[in-house]
Image (cartoon, rainbow, N blue to C red):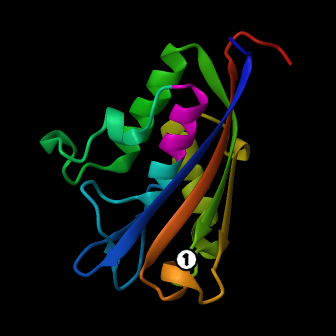
Amino acid sequence: MKPIRVGFGYDVHPFAENRELWLGGIRIPYEKGLKGHSDADVLIHAICDALLGAANERDIGYHFPDTGAEFKNIDSKILLARTMDLIRSANYELGNIDLTVCAEKPKLNPFIPQMKTCLAQTMQVDKEDISIKATTSEKMGFVGREEGIAVFATALLFKHNLVI
């Protein structure tokens, strides 16, 4: 067993009418939301996959399947808190997480500080351990055509009692 582990997460959701847009645990004012079984917070879903991958605990769909009625429209912050409980029960703690959100619209930079604060509270970590960057795909692909949002996440975990 290694004292330091890295995980990678990726998630994508298409835009949908008549849905609220939730990213990083906060509601973003926009004309469309994202389609999904839960609240479709694509950023939190990518975080969960990165954390679970680093801890060798499979993926978000394994732990919170989209076939489960208990997860229908669930607040993804609940899934993130449960994921943190799971990795902590395996004696891991977050070193840091690095996120890149790919979206043509809406512009997300004004919301990044609020997302960091919300995620830090949910994960019970320092907000300086969370990096969020927003970019576009320069009008290419499904993101460029404004069909949805993609998020890439990298997480570093370390054994809780390890001093580096």
Q: On the rendered structure, is 115 left or right of 69? A: right
Compared with 35, 126 (above or below) is: above
* Badge count: 1
Q: In terms of secondary structure, where does tag 1 sit?
A: loop
Residue 42: x %, y % from top left: 44, 59
Q: Which residue is mark 1?
A: 103
Name which quarter of the figure residue 148 lies in.
Answer: bottom left
Q: On the rendered structure, is 85 left or right of 103? A: left
Instruction: Work out which residue is located at the far front of the displayed protein and give it.
Output: 141
**Nearer-the-camera pick, 15 or 163:** 15
Name which quarter of the figure residue 70 lies in.
Answer: top left
Q: Which residues are magenta?
A: 47-56
**Nearer-the-camera pick, 115 or 35:** 35
Residue 14 falls inside the magenta stretch: no
Q: Amino acid at mark 1?
A: Ala
Q: Quadrant of the C terminus?
A: top right
Residue visible at 34% across and 81% down in the picture: 32
Residue 54 falls inside the magenta stretch: yes
Q: Main secondary structure of the magenta part?
A: helix
Compared with 11, 109 (above or below) is: below
**Nearer-the-camera pick, 150 or 80:** 150
Name which quarter of the figure residue 38 lies in.
Answer: bottom left
Asked if residue 124 shows in the view, the reply is no
Residue visible at 56% across and 48% down in the picture: 9
Q: Quadrant of the N terminus?
A: top right
Residue visible at 24% across and 56% down in the picture: 37
Residue visible at 65% across and 70% down in the picture: 134
